[in-house]
Image (cartoon, grey):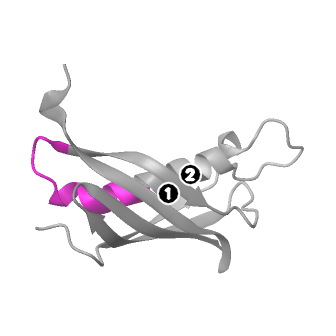
Amino acid sequence: MPIEIGLSNEQRYRVTDDMAPPHLPVKVLGTPNMIGLIEGTCLLAVQPSLAPAQATVGTHVCVSHQGAAASGKEIVIRCKLVKIEKRRLTFETEVECEGRLISKGTHERAIIDTTKFG
């Protein structure tokens, strides 16, 4: 299937203690882990549309982290492909916890040829 504007994905994750920043006294989803989950959600959206020798890599992340998600809570990550420029893909992203928006932003991925690694 071709990669087209509007391609979307939704993933649900359970926040675990190991996703929390070690410097905080409470166990909540840390920003680096949230970003990793956002990247993974975007990757899963586009991966089935890639040719066998293609992959995507993250190139830019611009997201807010405006609310907490405690350990044990479920988060929902949604992404939608909104822009294609040659090999660069731009997704709009959002993260919710219990119906509250805790993150909104964009994530860019680039399509690469894996046969060029060596």
Query: Is residue 116 visible from the viewing direction of this image?
Result: yes
Q: Which residue: 50% across, 68% down?
A: 93
Q: For residue 35, which numbered disc appears in the image?
A: 2
Q: Which residue: 60% across, 46% down?
A: 33
Disc 1 + disc 2, Cβ < 8 Å? yes
| Main secondary structure type of the part rendered in magenta | helix
Would you say 81 lies left or right of 16 here? left
Q: Which residue: 86% across, 43% down?
A: 24
Find the magenta span and give its range.
Answer: 41-54
Q: Quadrant of residue 23?
A: top right
Q: For residue 95, which numbered disc appears in the image?
A: none
The residue pinned by badge 1 equals 38
Is the N terminus in the top left, top right, bottom left or bottom right quadrant?
A: bottom left
Q: Please, is residue 48 above or below residue 94 in the view?
A: above
Kindly identify the amino acid type of the residue bearing the numbered disc 2.
Answer: Ile
Whole-percent x and y of residue 19?
A: 66, 44
